Protein backbone atom coordinates (compact mmCIF):
# COMPACT_ATOMS: atom_id res chain seq x y z
CA UNK A 1 0.00 0.00 0.00
CA UNK A 2 3.01 2.30 0.41
CA UNK A 3 3.14 2.74 -3.39
CA UNK A 4 -0.35 4.26 -3.28
CA UNK A 5 0.94 7.34 -1.46
CA UNK A 6 3.14 8.14 -4.49
CA UNK A 7 0.46 7.53 -7.11
CA UNK A 8 -0.41 10.68 -9.13
CA UNK A 9 -4.16 10.11 -8.75
CA UNK A 10 -3.86 9.73 -4.97
CA UNK A 11 -1.66 12.85 -4.79
CA UNK A 12 -4.23 14.77 -6.86
CA UNK A 13 -7.06 13.62 -4.57
CA UNK A 14 -5.12 14.78 -1.50
CA UNK A 15 -4.60 18.17 -3.17
CA UNK A 16 -8.30 18.53 -4.04
CA UNK A 17 -9.18 17.75 -0.42
CA UNK A 18 -6.85 20.56 0.70
CA UNK A 19 -4.33 18.14 2.20
CA UNK A 20 -1.32 19.16 0.10
CA UNK A 21 0.75 17.21 -2.39
CA UNK A 22 3.83 16.25 -0.38
CA UNK A 23 4.49 13.52 2.13
CA UNK A 24 2.37 10.43 2.65
CA UNK A 25 -0.84 11.37 0.83
CA UNK A 26 -2.46 8.01 1.56
CA UNK A 27 -2.02 8.50 5.29
CA UNK A 28 -3.41 12.04 5.15
CA UNK A 29 -6.50 10.94 3.23
CA UNK A 30 -7.05 8.14 5.75
CA UNK A 31 -6.85 10.60 8.62
CA UNK A 32 -9.19 12.99 6.78
CA UNK A 33 -11.85 10.25 6.45
CA UNK A 34 -11.45 9.11 10.07
CA UNK A 35 -11.70 12.69 11.37
CA UNK A 36 -14.99 13.19 9.52
CA UNK A 37 -16.31 10.00 11.08
CA UNK A 38 -15.06 10.90 14.57
CA UNK A 39 -16.78 14.29 14.37
CA UNK A 40 -20.10 12.55 13.67
CA UNK A 41 -19.62 9.94 16.38
CA UNK A 42 -18.77 12.62 18.93
CA UNK A 43 -22.15 14.28 18.27
CA UNK A 44 -24.20 11.11 17.89
CA UNK A 45 -22.76 8.32 20.06
CA UNK A 46 -23.07 4.76 18.73
CA UNK A 47 -22.70 1.40 20.46
CA UNK A 48 -23.25 -1.16 17.69
CA UNK A 49 -22.03 -1.60 14.13
CA UNK A 50 -25.60 -1.35 12.89
CA UNK A 51 -26.09 2.05 14.52
CA UNK A 52 -22.68 3.11 13.20
CA UNK A 53 -23.59 2.19 9.62
CA UNK A 54 -26.96 3.97 9.92
CA UNK A 55 -25.31 7.09 11.36
CA UNK A 56 -22.71 7.45 8.60
CA UNK A 57 -25.11 6.63 5.76
CA UNK A 58 -27.64 9.13 7.11
CA UNK A 59 -24.98 11.84 7.54
CA UNK A 60 -23.84 11.33 3.94
CA UNK A 61 -27.41 11.30 2.63
CA UNK A 62 -27.27 7.68 1.46
CA UNK A 63 -30.05 5.10 1.42
CA UNK A 64 -28.52 1.61 1.32
CA UNK A 65 -30.56 -1.03 -0.50
CA UNK A 66 -29.44 -4.68 -0.43
CA UNK A 67 -30.42 -6.90 -3.37
CA UNK A 68 -30.88 -10.38 -1.89
CA UNK A 69 -32.67 -11.97 -4.88
CA UNK A 70 -33.31 -11.12 -8.54
CA UNK A 71 -36.90 -10.16 -7.77
CA UNK A 72 -35.67 -7.27 -5.58
CA UNK A 73 -34.72 -5.34 -8.71
CA UNK A 74 -38.33 -4.72 -9.73
CA UNK A 75 -39.31 -3.76 -6.18
CA UNK A 76 -36.39 -1.35 -5.75
CA UNK A 77 -36.85 0.14 -9.22
CA UNK A 78 -40.48 0.94 -8.35
CA UNK A 79 -39.48 2.32 -4.93
CA UNK A 80 -36.87 4.66 -6.43
CA UNK A 81 -38.58 5.45 -9.74
CA UNK A 82 -38.24 9.20 -9.06
CA UNK A 83 -34.47 8.98 -9.50
CA UNK A 84 -34.62 8.03 -13.17
CA UNK A 85 -37.23 6.80 -15.70
CA UNK A 86 -34.72 4.13 -16.76
CA UNK A 87 -33.73 2.95 -13.30
CA UNK A 88 -35.00 -0.60 -13.86
CA UNK A 89 -32.97 -0.94 -17.05
CA UNK A 90 -29.92 0.38 -15.21
CA UNK A 91 -30.29 -2.10 -12.35
CA UNK A 92 -30.86 -5.00 -14.73
CA UNK A 93 -27.80 -4.01 -16.75
CA UNK A 94 -25.60 -3.69 -13.64
CA UNK A 95 -26.73 -6.65 -11.55
CA UNK A 96 -28.07 -9.20 -14.04
CA UNK A 97 -25.73 -8.71 -16.99
CA UNK A 98 -22.36 -7.67 -15.52
CA UNK A 99 -20.47 -8.30 -12.26
CA UNK A 100 -21.30 -5.04 -10.46
CA UNK A 101 -21.23 -5.35 -6.66
CA UNK A 102 -22.24 -1.82 -5.73
CA UNK A 103 -24.06 0.87 -7.69
CA UNK A 104 -24.39 4.39 -6.28
CA UNK A 105 -27.03 6.66 -7.85
CA UNK A 106 -27.49 10.36 -7.15
CA UNK A 107 -31.03 11.67 -6.88
CA UNK A 108 -31.28 14.55 -9.43
CA UNK A 109 -34.16 16.34 -7.65
CA UNK A 110 -34.53 15.08 -4.07
CA UNK A 111 -37.70 16.14 -2.30
CA UNK A 112 -37.79 16.99 1.44
CA UNK A 113 -37.14 13.77 3.29
CA UNK A 114 -35.38 12.13 0.33
CA UNK A 115 -31.73 11.20 0.55
CA UNK A 116 -29.32 12.49 -2.06
CA UNK A 117 -27.96 9.05 -2.94
CA UNK A 118 -29.10 5.44 -3.12
CA UNK A 119 -26.49 2.69 -2.88
CA UNK A 120 -27.63 -0.60 -4.38
CA UNK A 121 -25.56 -3.51 -3.03
CA UNK A 122 -25.53 -7.04 -4.41
CA UNK A 123 -26.20 -9.47 -1.54
CA UNK A 124 -27.32 -12.48 -3.59
CA UNK A 125 -25.82 -15.90 -3.00
CA UNK A 126 -22.01 -15.82 -2.59
CA UNK A 127 -22.07 -12.00 -2.87
CA UNK A 128 -23.76 -11.84 0.55
CA UNK A 129 -20.30 -12.38 2.10
CA UNK A 130 -19.08 -9.10 0.63
CA UNK A 131 -22.28 -7.03 0.83
CA UNK A 132 -21.46 -5.41 4.19
CA UNK A 133 -18.01 -4.39 2.96
CA UNK A 134 -19.41 -3.19 -0.38
CA UNK A 135 -21.81 -0.88 1.48
CA UNK A 136 -18.87 0.63 3.35
CA UNK A 137 -16.92 0.91 0.10
CA UNK A 138 -19.68 3.09 -1.39
CA UNK A 139 -19.93 5.24 1.75
CA UNK A 140 -16.15 5.71 1.83
CA UNK A 141 -16.17 7.04 -1.73
CA UNK A 142 -18.46 9.83 -0.55
CA UNK A 143 -16.36 10.43 2.57
CA UNK A 144 -13.27 11.19 0.47
CA UNK A 145 -15.08 12.72 -2.51
CA UNK A 146 -13.79 16.31 -3.01
CA UNK A 147 -16.69 18.74 -2.44
CA UNK A 148 -15.68 20.84 -5.46
CA UNK A 149 -16.17 17.90 -7.85
CA UNK A 150 -19.64 16.94 -9.01
CA UNK A 151 -20.52 13.25 -8.88
CA UNK A 152 -21.47 12.25 -12.45
CA UNK A 153 -24.87 10.87 -11.44
CA UNK A 154 -23.63 7.37 -10.60
CA UNK A 155 -20.64 5.21 -9.80
CA UNK A 156 -20.17 1.44 -9.71
CA UNK A 157 -17.98 -1.00 -7.84
CA UNK A 158 -16.74 -3.96 -9.87
CA UNK A 159 -14.56 -6.23 -7.77
CA UNK A 160 -12.37 -7.35 -10.70
CA UNK A 161 -11.28 -3.75 -11.34
CA UNK A 162 -10.49 -2.62 -7.81
CA UNK A 163 -6.93 -3.94 -7.57
CA UNK A 164 -5.68 -2.05 -10.62
CA UNK A 165 -7.32 1.27 -9.73
CA UNK A 166 -5.39 3.39 -7.18
CA UNK A 167 -8.42 5.32 -5.91
CA UNK A 168 -10.48 2.14 -5.59
CA UNK A 169 -7.57 0.51 -3.70
CA UNK A 170 -7.27 3.52 -1.39
CA UNK A 171 -11.03 3.46 -0.73
CA UNK A 172 -10.76 -0.28 0.00
CA UNK A 173 -8.14 0.39 2.69
CA UNK A 174 -10.28 3.00 4.45
CA UNK A 175 -13.50 1.03 4.02
CA UNK A 176 -11.87 -2.00 5.64
CA UNK A 177 -10.97 0.11 8.69
CA UNK A 178 -14.42 1.67 9.02
CA UNK A 179 -16.27 -1.61 8.47
CA UNK A 180 -14.53 -2.83 11.66
CA UNK A 181 -14.42 0.52 13.46
CA UNK A 182 -11.69 0.20 16.07
CA UNK A 183 -13.53 1.67 19.11
CA UNK A 184 -16.27 -0.93 18.59
CA UNK A 185 -14.28 -3.93 17.33
CA UNK A 186 -11.06 -3.87 19.37
CA UNK A 187 -12.68 -4.60 22.79
CA UNK A 188 -14.47 -7.62 21.29
CA UNK A 189 -11.35 -8.88 19.53
CA UNK A 190 -9.18 -8.43 22.63
CA UNK A 191 -11.68 -10.33 24.77
CA UNK A 192 -11.82 -13.25 22.34
CA UNK A 193 -8.01 -13.27 21.90
CA UNK A 194 -7.40 -13.27 25.66
CA UNK A 195 -9.44 -16.45 26.02
CA UNK A 196 -6.77 -18.56 24.31
CA UNK A 197 -3.81 -16.18 24.30
CA UNK A 198 -3.30 -15.73 20.57
CA UNK A 199 -5.02 -14.92 17.30
CA UNK A 200 -6.71 -17.75 15.40
CA UNK A 201 -9.40 -18.02 12.76
CA UNK A 202 -11.69 -19.28 15.52
CA UNK A 203 -11.02 -16.12 17.55
CA UNK A 204 -11.59 -13.96 14.48
CA UNK A 205 -14.84 -15.69 13.56
CA UNK A 206 -16.26 -15.41 17.09
CA UNK A 207 -15.38 -11.71 17.16
CA UNK A 208 -16.95 -11.27 13.72
CA UNK A 209 -20.20 -12.95 14.75
CA UNK A 210 -20.44 -10.83 17.90
CA UNK A 211 -19.63 -7.57 16.13
CA UNK A 212 -21.02 -7.77 12.60
CA UNK A 213 -22.12 -11.21 11.40
CA UNK A 214 -22.89 -9.80 7.94
CA UNK A 215 -19.17 -9.36 7.24
CA UNK A 216 -16.99 -12.00 5.58
CA UNK A 217 -14.38 -14.02 7.45
CA UNK A 218 -11.58 -12.65 5.24
CA UNK A 219 -12.59 -9.03 5.88
CA UNK A 220 -12.73 -9.78 9.61
CA UNK A 221 -9.31 -11.46 9.42
CA UNK A 222 -7.76 -8.42 7.75
CA UNK A 223 -9.22 -6.13 10.43
CA UNK A 224 -8.18 -8.47 13.25
CA UNK A 225 -4.60 -8.74 12.03
CA UNK A 226 -4.41 -4.96 11.64
CA UNK A 227 -5.63 -4.41 15.23
CA UNK A 228 -3.71 -7.29 16.81
CA UNK A 229 -0.83 -6.33 19.08
CA UNK A 230 0.94 -9.55 18.06
CA UNK A 231 2.92 -9.91 14.84
CA UNK A 232 0.67 -11.55 12.24
CA UNK A 233 -0.23 -11.54 8.59
CA UNK A 234 -3.23 -12.89 6.71
CA UNK A 235 -2.89 -14.34 3.21
CA UNK A 236 -5.15 -15.58 0.46
CA UNK A 237 -3.81 -18.24 -1.89
CA UNK A 238 -4.96 -19.51 -5.25
CA UNK A 239 -3.56 -21.10 -8.40
CA UNK A 240 -2.01 -18.31 -10.48
CA UNK A 241 0.83 -17.27 -12.77
CA UNK A 242 3.50 -14.74 -11.87
CA UNK A 243 3.16 -11.33 -13.55
CA UNK A 244 6.17 -12.06 -15.73
CA UNK A 245 4.64 -15.36 -16.79
CA UNK A 246 1.40 -13.62 -17.75
CA UNK A 247 3.40 -11.23 -19.94
CA UNK A 248 5.19 -14.19 -21.54
CA UNK A 249 1.91 -15.98 -22.16
CA UNK A 250 0.50 -12.92 -23.93
CA UNK A 251 3.66 -12.27 -25.89
CA UNK A 252 3.39 -12.81 -29.67
CA UNK A 253 6.83 -14.43 -29.44
CA UNK A 254 5.33 -17.42 -27.64
CA UNK A 255 4.69 -19.93 -30.40
CA UNK A 256 1.64 -22.12 -30.10
CA UNK A 257 3.74 -25.17 -30.81
CA UNK A 258 6.28 -24.41 -28.10
CA UNK A 259 5.10 -27.12 -25.73
CA UNK A 260 8.02 -26.82 -23.31
CA UNK A 261 7.36 -23.12 -22.78
CA UNK A 262 3.66 -23.73 -22.33
CA UNK A 263 4.34 -26.36 -19.66
CA UNK A 264 6.60 -23.91 -17.79
CA UNK A 265 3.75 -21.39 -17.66
CA UNK A 266 1.35 -23.64 -15.79
CA UNK A 267 -0.33 -21.88 -12.82
CA UNK A 268 1.06 -22.68 -9.37
CA UNK A 269 -0.40 -22.17 -5.93
CA UNK A 270 0.65 -18.65 -4.96
CA UNK A 271 0.00 -15.97 -2.39
CA UNK A 272 -2.31 -13.55 -4.22
CA UNK A 273 -2.93 -11.30 -1.21
CA UNK A 274 -0.81 -10.73 1.88
CA UNK A 275 -1.65 -8.22 4.60
CA UNK A 276 0.86 -7.94 7.47
CA UNK A 277 0.30 -5.74 10.52
CA UNK A 278 2.83 -3.20 11.78
CA UNK A 279 4.31 -5.67 14.29
CA UNK A 280 4.86 -8.21 11.49
CA UNK A 281 6.59 -5.61 9.33
CA UNK A 282 9.09 -5.06 12.15
CA UNK A 283 9.61 -8.82 12.65
CA UNK A 284 11.33 -11.49 10.58
CA UNK A 285 8.17 -12.37 8.64
CA UNK A 286 8.91 -11.82 4.96
CA UNK A 287 6.17 -13.58 2.98
CA UNK A 288 5.46 -11.64 -0.23
CA UNK A 289 2.68 -11.51 -2.78
CA UNK A 290 3.07 -13.89 -5.78
CA UNK A 291 5.36 -16.28 -3.86
CA UNK A 292 4.75 -19.98 -4.48
CA UNK A 293 3.25 -21.84 -1.53
CA UNK A 294 5.55 -24.67 -0.33
CA UNK A 295 3.97 -28.07 -1.09
CA UNK A 296 4.42 -29.19 2.54
CA UNK A 297 2.62 -26.14 3.98
CA UNK A 298 -0.84 -26.57 5.49
CA UNK A 299 -1.90 -23.84 3.05
CA UNK A 300 -1.20 -26.29 0.23
CA UNK A 301 -3.02 -29.10 2.04
CA UNK A 302 -6.07 -26.90 2.61
CA UNK A 303 -6.12 -25.94 -1.07
CA UNK A 304 -6.04 -29.59 -2.11
CA UNK A 305 -8.77 -30.61 0.35
CA UNK A 306 -12.07 -31.73 -1.16
CA UNK A 307 -14.16 -30.07 1.58
CA UNK A 308 -13.94 -27.14 3.98
CA UNK A 309 -11.11 -27.69 6.45
CA UNK A 310 -9.16 -25.85 9.12
CA UNK A 311 -5.53 -26.91 9.59
CA UNK A 312 -2.65 -25.71 11.75
CA UNK A 313 1.02 -26.65 11.97
CA UNK A 314 4.44 -25.27 12.96
CA UNK A 315 6.39 -24.44 9.82
CA UNK A 316 9.56 -22.62 8.83
CA UNK A 317 9.96 -19.61 6.59
CA UNK A 318 12.97 -21.27 4.96
CA UNK A 319 10.49 -23.48 3.10
CA UNK A 320 9.60 -20.43 1.01
CA UNK A 321 11.70 -19.26 -1.94
CA UNK A 322 11.85 -16.20 -4.17
CA UNK A 323 12.72 -16.32 -7.88
CA UNK A 324 15.75 -14.05 -7.52
CA UNK A 325 16.79 -14.46 -3.89
CA UNK A 326 16.26 -18.16 -3.37
CA UNK A 327 15.47 -19.59 0.04
CA UNK A 328 14.14 -17.21 2.72
CA UNK A 329 15.93 -16.93 6.09
CA UNK A 330 14.96 -19.40 8.79
CA UNK A 331 12.11 -18.20 10.99
CA UNK A 332 9.80 -20.46 12.99
CA UNK A 333 6.17 -19.93 12.03
CA UNK A 334 2.78 -21.06 13.24
CA UNK A 335 0.54 -21.32 10.18
CA UNK A 336 -3.21 -21.79 10.23
CA UNK A 337 -5.04 -22.51 6.97
CA UNK A 338 -8.77 -22.46 6.38
CA UNK A 339 -10.77 -23.42 3.32
CA UNK A 340 -14.25 -22.00 2.83
CA UNK A 341 -15.75 -23.04 -0.49
CA UNK A 342 -13.27 -22.18 -3.23
CA UNK A 343 -11.34 -19.73 -1.03
CA UNK A 344 -8.24 -20.61 1.03
CA UNK A 345 -6.95 -18.18 3.64
CA UNK A 346 -3.94 -18.35 5.91
CA UNK A 347 -2.99 -16.80 9.21
CA UNK A 348 0.78 -16.67 9.74
CA UNK A 349 2.32 -15.90 13.14
CA UNK A 350 5.88 -16.10 14.46
CA UNK A 351 6.26 -19.54 16.02
CA UNK A 352 8.06 -20.57 19.21
CA UNK A 353 11.82 -20.95 18.92
Image (spheres, rainbow, N blue to C red):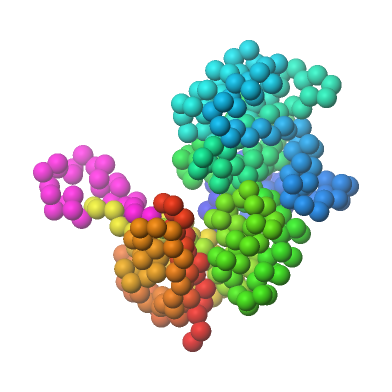
Q: Where 188 falls versus 107 (above or below)?
A: below
Residue in the foreground of this view, choosing between 33 and 349: 349
On-image quarter of the N terminus: bottom right
Q: Which residue is drawn at 63% across and 12% down?
A: 85
Q: In x, y percent, where is residue 339? A: 44, 59
Q: Picture quarter containing residue 323?
A: bottom left
Span shown in magenta: 238-264
Q: Which residue is drawn at 54% across and 44% down?
A: 166
Q: Which residue is drawn at 49% across and 87% down?
A: 353
Q: In x, y percent, where is residue 66? A: 63, 35
Q: Residue furthest top?
A: 85
Q: In this view, does 144 lie to the left or right of 90?
A: right
Q: Where 207 falls versus 77 (above or below)?
A: below
Residue in the foreground of this view, choosing between 148 and 347: 347
Q: Say if the magenta span includes residue 250.
A: yes
Q: In x, y percent, where is residue 177? A: 66, 53
Q: Residue at x 59, y 42 (%)?
A: 131
Q: Where 320 falls versus 39 (above or below)?
A: below
Q: Where 297 falls versus 342 (above or below)?
A: below
Residue 95 visible in the picture: yes
Q: Which residue lies furthest to the right in this view?
A: 43
Q: In x, y percent, where is residue 182? A: 72, 59
Amino acid sequence: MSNLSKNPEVIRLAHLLGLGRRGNCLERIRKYAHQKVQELVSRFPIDTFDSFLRLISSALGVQIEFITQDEDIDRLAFKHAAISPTIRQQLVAEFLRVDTEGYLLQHPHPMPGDRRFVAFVDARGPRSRRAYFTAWHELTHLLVHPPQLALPGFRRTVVSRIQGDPIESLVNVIAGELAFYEPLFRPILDEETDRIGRLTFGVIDRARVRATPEASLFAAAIASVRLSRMAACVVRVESALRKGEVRELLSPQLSLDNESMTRQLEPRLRVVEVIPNEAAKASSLTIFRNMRVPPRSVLHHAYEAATDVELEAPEDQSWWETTQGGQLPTCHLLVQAIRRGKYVYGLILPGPN
